Amino acid sequence: MIGWAKAAGMSVSVDKIGNVFMRREGRNPQLPPIVSGSHIDTQPTGGKFDGNYGVLAALEVVRTLNDLEIETEAPIEVVFWTNEEGSRFVPVMMGSGVFAGVFALERSMPYRMRKGKRWAKSWRALAISAARRRGSGRSAPTLKAHIEQGPILEAEEKVIGVVQGVLGIRWYDCVVSGQESHAGPTPMRLRKDALQVATHIMQEVVAIAGRSEEGRGDRGPGAGLSEQPQRGAGRSDFSIDMRNLSDALVDEMDRQLREFIGKIEQESGLAVALKEVSHYPAAPFHAECQAAIAAAAQRLGYPAREIVSGAGHDAVYMSYLAPTGMIFIPCKDGISHNEIEYASPEHVTAGR
């Protein structure tokens, strides 16, 4: 990627967390740069379009400007953010988070890889000079192209998704504590089966999500369940994922969940512990960026619609620093984070 950037006449710099910036100068180098890009890391069995497409699309814009001998007023920077996926190191979106000041650099360097290796040691092994400072907050608009990672655009035969924002997210750990008992002699009314109560909570999570247009609700795999089919479960552990378009809507989902848990504790007599483990605020994108994307799609004759992102993106943290917009293109069958992830050449071209 760096070689392609240099071949296009761009200068390259790397900051201390590993973000890579590839710069094409403009007439006025004092102006803040227009930034575009994404990430090039992926999931262990991920595809080749998630993230990579946004970086290559931005580079292609620079190549096209070069071919047409167009000099822009402001500089353009193509960026790929380090450790967006969080597959090897946590937290996710580490690079853009440090750049935006969400995470302190000094606290990020000791983060460990899932198998124990520290980020700082892995980063030093690359032996790249890194002198660029953290983002100052002075930036022109930031635009990012990305595959949708969902089925909506393809199902509606739309080419461009004008992204309104990224859903707010809350993740919880939930533990239901009951009492193991023999499944034969114990009448249903006297059982304290943790799995039965957990199942009701899981179903309510889905019901809560369905009460608003952009609500999302899911649960992770349970643990601590009884391994004996003839015995009721004494404990059930599982995770809960709730998302929505605004922080107010996520708060309402949280309220409904806690109200339901209080009710089912009273009815069942079992204790339910709900612990919030992560919270990511909703990130609405800039109205003028959305309008510009919609106008360009109309001018070029691409069918478009407004859409939200249920997945996190580096653009979330960039929106803290500058007006930010995202462009979605369809991906086949809505599949992402999978080796069969695919976007057609026509859609790839349209999005850039």
Image (cartoon, rainbow, N blue to C red):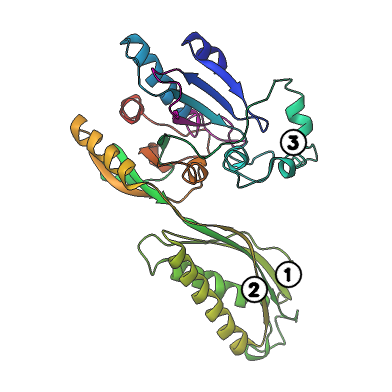
Residue 180, image quadrant: bottom right
How many residues crowd mark 3 within 10 Å: few (<14), some (14–19), many (20+)?
many
Task: Assign a secondary structure to mark 3.
Answer: helix
* Residue, disc 2: 195
Query: Which segment is the magenta one?
Result: 25-52
Residue 175, image quadrant: bottom right
Figure quadrant of the C terminus: top left
Figure quadrant of the N terminus: top right
Nearest the viewer among 288 and 270 is 288
Q: Is residue 159 located in the magenta-colored stretch of the structure? A: no
How many residues crowd mark 2 within 10 Å: few (<14), some (14–19), many (20+)?
many
Mark closer to the chain start, 2 or 3:
3
Residue at screen point 48% across, 41% down: 315
Residue at screen point 58% across, 83% down: 262
User: Looking at the picture, how far across and down is residue 327, in whole percent?
Assistant: 36, 38
Q: CA distance from mark 3 to mark 1?
A: 38 Å
Q: Is residue 198 visible?
A: yes
